[in-house]
Amino acid sequence: MNPETHTNGYLSGSKLEKILRAGIFAVTAELGPPQSADASVIRTKAALLKGNCDAVNLTDNQTAIVRMSSIGAGALVLQEGLEPVIQMVCRDRNRLAMQADLMGAYALGIRNLLCLSGDHQTFGNHPTAKNVYDIDSIHMIKMVSDMRDKHVFQCGDPIKGAEPRFFIGAAAAPFAGPVEFRPFRLAKKVQAGASFIQSQLIYDLNAFKVFMEKVGKLGLHEKVYFLAGVGPLKSPAMAKYMKDSVPGILVPDELIARMTAAGKPWAGKKPDELTKEDKKARSEAWKAEGIKICVELIQQLREIEGVAGVHIMAIEWEEAVKPIVECAGLLPRPEIKDPEPVAL
Amino acid sequence: MIIAEQKPLEELKTLIGDAKKVLVVGCGTCVTVCFAGGAREAAIVSSSLRMATKLNGDSKEITDFTVQRQCEWEYLDQLTEPIENVEVILSLGCGIGVQAIAEHFPSKWVVPGLNTKFLGLPIEQGVWSERCAACGDCILGITGGICPIARCSKSLLNGPCGGSENGHCEINPEVDCAWQLIYDRLSSMGKLDVLLEIQPPKNWQTSRDGGPRKIVREDLRLGSKEEI
Amino acid sequence: MSAKRRVTYIKDLLAKIGLEPERVQMFQMSSAQAAQFAEAARQMAGQIEALGPSPLRMKDKLLDEKQVEE
């Protein structure tokens, strides 16, 4: 059977792929699986995101802390009627496990994959574990696109039955070092077979515009769908932490100032003078400002050439996604009427 | 060279256990240069153990002897006399030396006094840094002489990852980002186009992943047909 | 500075062995400071007396006595 006809000309036939192909500004969100085997956590979070995004990413042992697997969570998300984007890092699996897991994921109905290097295990709760890193993220992109387009395993053996047909994505860190090389590394990922990009959190629009211009000059706007990463700030401390301690995140002082200003009504009190009600109210004020900033960023990002959508990372705050998407004028999310391809 | 570090004295005491007669064996090559197991260190370890065990009311006979290299049988032959009646040999050689002594004197119990850490060099006096992972398939020719297998925390071949900031690796600000180093080196030589190519996945079979390794050079073997 | 590093190293080693690090001390002065030297020597002598004979010598004595008994 000709794979071209069976997916109606799409690479994977996923909803995300169809929306991006149709030129609609896409919205993806993130769902962090729990540090347990509790499926109800996934169902609860999925309910918060349903209808508010086109697809939802399931992180893979994020920050090297063991959590329910991305594929397991992805299968549950499918049951809840949302489209998953599974993430796979190079830290924990060798090429055998990756290919095996991806075939299983495809058989379960998963169609989107984000390929990542993964945070080093020293960050997490199992720092004594053996480091895998058999292949890097660019190898993974090529391996998965060859499975789809050439019907071969990484070793070259042909895949004799149904091949997994993923819509393949990669990450981008526009401000990580060396900054001048980042657009070229993005080009390598596209060359390897990445169809969409989800970037690291963007707060500094000027710096991001410079990056996107360089990306455009390399002819990448036509070749890859770039979803800019955004995330609502929860507090001035979070903003400062992101700026100082997380590689590749630039946070303009102006935004830190706005977050601090939102807490002004309580600024006169010393920390031990703040009541429980004070802290709650202040936190609500910070969060409201964080969401406001996020909405503004989304509106401005839409104007930048080459930006095909946004990837909203509301870390452990999935409730924030709906207000952000709504205020940014991105609701309702479009329904795609094309029939889904059926896995053979 | 091989860089090693001494195990703590408490651990050495546990390793020699109840033995009454112990020989501390130093090595005159790599571990001398990294001040972990040379003649001087062997003498200090020997004397420290004598004192420490004596304070516990345990009188042991602990002496030391250093050979040029523990990793060659001919040098180890020098140990034949010194190890007579010795119950435990505490080797201050690298892991290779410890095993060589054990293999050469199979009736003797040999214990390691060092933790062998890595292949590297002294970047300045007193500071040693890892450089080589002995992967068996050297790619230094395309990375400007900087090894991403040993020096990139994720052994990326198409680095850097998103955790590179200010030339440092996300795991520790004191660890250089190998890919920043490679980028700078290739940039200074006008060879950045090398980084535009996608490097293929590594064949890990030549590294330890493929199983314990061995090299046989028939042209060098004694009694080979090549010998006249 | 090298002498100071060595003294620190020895103190550290003595502690690991189980002996008192105070048995080794470093005093800094010029060769012309006779009075300070004498004072330092007095101080050290007092400290050592307080610490008593090296435990190793006591152990030697005990072990010798034990051997005599056997």
Image (cartoon, rainbow, N blue to C red):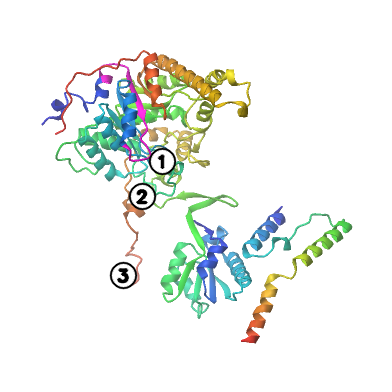
From the top left corner, tell me how far across and down residue A218 is, in percent.
36, 23
Give the camera-side residue of C29 and B135: C29
| Magenta residue span | A19-38
Residue at horizontal 16 percent and vertical 32 percent from the top: A343
Circle 1 is placed at which residue position?
A64
Mark 3: amino acid? Ser
- The verdict on a common chain for dots 3 and 2 is yes
- Compared to residue B220, the image places residue B146 above or below, namely above
Say the numbered circle drawn on residue C16: none
Mark 1: amino acid? Ala
Circle 3 is placed at which residue position?
B224
Q: Is residue A48 left or right of residue C67?
A: left
Give the camera-side residue of B123 and B21: B21
Give the camera-side residue of B46 and B193: B46
Closest to the camera, between mark 1 and mark 3, is 1
Closest to the camera, between mark 3 and mark 2, is 2
Say the numbered circle drawn on residue B137: 2
Residue at horizontal 36 percent and vertical 27 percent from the top: A198
Closest to the camera, between mark 2 and mark 1, is 1
Q: Is residue B79 left or right of residue C6?
A: left
